[in-house]
Amino acid sequence: MKPVSHISGRAYPFGAKNVDTDIIIPAHWLKTISRNGMGKGAFETVRAEPGNVFDDPEYAGAPILIAGDNFGCGSSREHAAWALADMGVQAVIAPSYSDIFSSNAFKNGILAVVLPQEAVDRLIEVAKTDPIDIDLESQTVTTPFQDRFTFEIDPFRKSCLLGGLDEIGLTLKMDGAIGAYEARRAEAFSWM
Amino acid sequence: MTSKPRTLYEKIWDAHVVETRDDGTSLIYIDRHLVHEVTSPQAFEGLRVAGRTVRRPDLTLAVPDHNLPTTARVDAAGRRLPIADRESADQLAALEHNTRAFGIRYFDAVAPEQGIVHVVGPEQGFTLPGTTLVCGDSHTAAHGALGALAFGIGTSEVEHVLATQTLLLKRSKAMEVRIDGTLGFGVTAKDLILEVIGRIGAAGGTGYVIEYTGSTIRAMSIEGRLTVANMSIEGGARAGLIAPDDKTYAYLEGRPMAPKGEAWTKAMAWWRTLPSDPGAVYDRTVLVDAAEIAPNVTWGTSPEDVVSIAGTVPDPDSFSDPSKREAARRALAYMGLVPGQRMQDVAIENIFIGSCTNSRIEDLRDAAGVVKGRRVASGVRQALVVPGSGLVKRQAEEEGLDRIFIEAGFEWREAGCSMCLAMNPDKVPAGERCASTSNRNFVGRQGPGARTHLLSPVMAAAAAVTGRLTDVRELMRG
Ligand code: SF4
């Protein structure tokens, strides 16, 4: 996984509450063999509406998505995180997330920033005209207008994101212990 | 030296800890990994993108089952027939490609060993007592019937196991479900597990690993035990375990992938130490009297919506929990049933005998026993028998079971998941009912708008020949 430390650029001022994973990626996109290319299906039903933020050239390729409460609720499909990553989203800012979505986002290197509703409202205003800056090291979100919001993040997740370590990468670092177990296993459980 | 008495679950867990971390999670070694076409493509792609390999291809076995069509797979000349659905064909091609690229053993779509992952594992002796076994499918719990700690995992975890042969896990609580006594005439393992789920509820086992104990389980065949353990997840438990015994060893000995000779002796010596110690403590115990169980059917859209075939559709107002009341109301609207309606009056248009819960040879023998000399009722539009594996199919044909089903008006299909989840062309039309030996009666599970009644193979056979939900005991008594 690529290390995540600094994300800056335009942000989709989406803002909707209770965005479920069916909205992020509809079920018919699940019968696929790739995690890539799912960006095409991301927010398909929202995109069907004229004037939606996702097709506005102003925000094309924006690395940040700003949403309302309870983002990523509903089905546990990991495809939701894959779809966001594929459309180029590296961070989401929202007041809250479903547990499974924040875990899936984390596993796929997407930073899920939690900020209070007032901060989110202010950022949506800024996002309409200007870029936003997220710094993971200092845990801050800033704007060109001297706004400065700090956010909390689980220290384990923070270090994984900063180091570009996915869970598999971390476990692979325990290769010695796994190898030692395999040696014990070959002795005690040779029949396996 | 006295050590604390341990449960079967604790013994398997302890034997697989690579390392325990400060935050209470443990890195657990995985002995067996089953792979199928639907939840694996993105995992293999993840490996490729990160430039990783499969750590232990020798501990991994792949077989397609979920969306493979169950109609003929070869033409008269023995050539493989193409799969019409492009996405299914792509998923299958990806599995073939990935298993070849990463050196994983693969039973292809036309191999005699092909079948549903959870039927193939035990049948091949890939599943063994005391092992940890995972698969990207929630019914992996089935393998617990042989004393393996087996559970379903998500796609990221599939990739994690492929790359590291381990998983980071937190230890679950242990629940004992103790069933004593003799199952009545016409009452099967399926009725037993439906009874258990009806009692503990669909979320009753959340956070637990269930161990099934008691004289009823000891007397039960391995096939029956597989049915019981299979549905642990429908009671919310990630895994269900049954201690290995002489029946387990007799079932496994000589299977293609089971240990042989000296290795077998060595394995047996350890397996015999696995059953829970006297005095081992469970976090919760549920007691069930087998003699009280009748043939069961489901009336709603959750596997906990269980009622005896002699019973009636419940009144939503009879539930004390308001959310359950609301759920029951919605379920009855979806199912097209009214409170107080007799279950035996419910007409059925589709019959499905199959799925990893009930598609083994014993299931087919039992169902054929009911069907023999009878005909599928005229109101039944579709009656499928889908064996769990190519080997089950072959054995059934050697025993003449296929003739019994076909002469009665059933379709005799190739092995796969089929109408259990309707990912292939086998679907229940919207608004129609299906008497199904599968494990999930969720909204739309067997096709959009499909209405599912879960029941045992003999009960499905009885529904097929009468055209309505039927107490098989009346039919068998003649
Ligand atoms: S038969 Fe049904 S429950 Fe079993 S593995 Fe296949 S889809 Fe899953």
Image (spheres, rainbow, N blue to C red):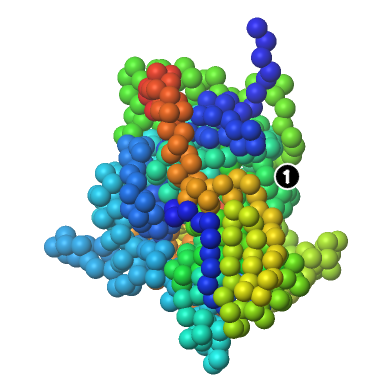
Residue found at the very far bottom of the displayed protein: A50
Which residue shows up at 69% across the image and 18% down it?
B4
Residue B466: give x, y in percent of width and height: 55, 67
Name the foreground residue: B368 vs B146.
B146
Which residue shows up at 63% across the image and 47% down it?
A155
Q: Which residue is mark 1?
A: B292
Q: Amino acid at mark 1?
A: Glu
Residue B105: give x, y in percent of width and height: 29, 43
**Label 1 within 8 A of ligand 1 by Cβ:** no
Residue A44 seen in this snapshot: yes
Residue A28 seen in this snapshot: no
Residue B23: give x, y in percent of width and height: 65, 37
Which residue shows up at 30% across the image and 66% down it?
B89
Name the foreground residue: B313 vs B233.
B233
Q: Chain of mark 1?
A: B
Q: Is residue B217 shown above or below A20?
A: above
Which residue shows up at 72% across the image and 71% down it?
A119
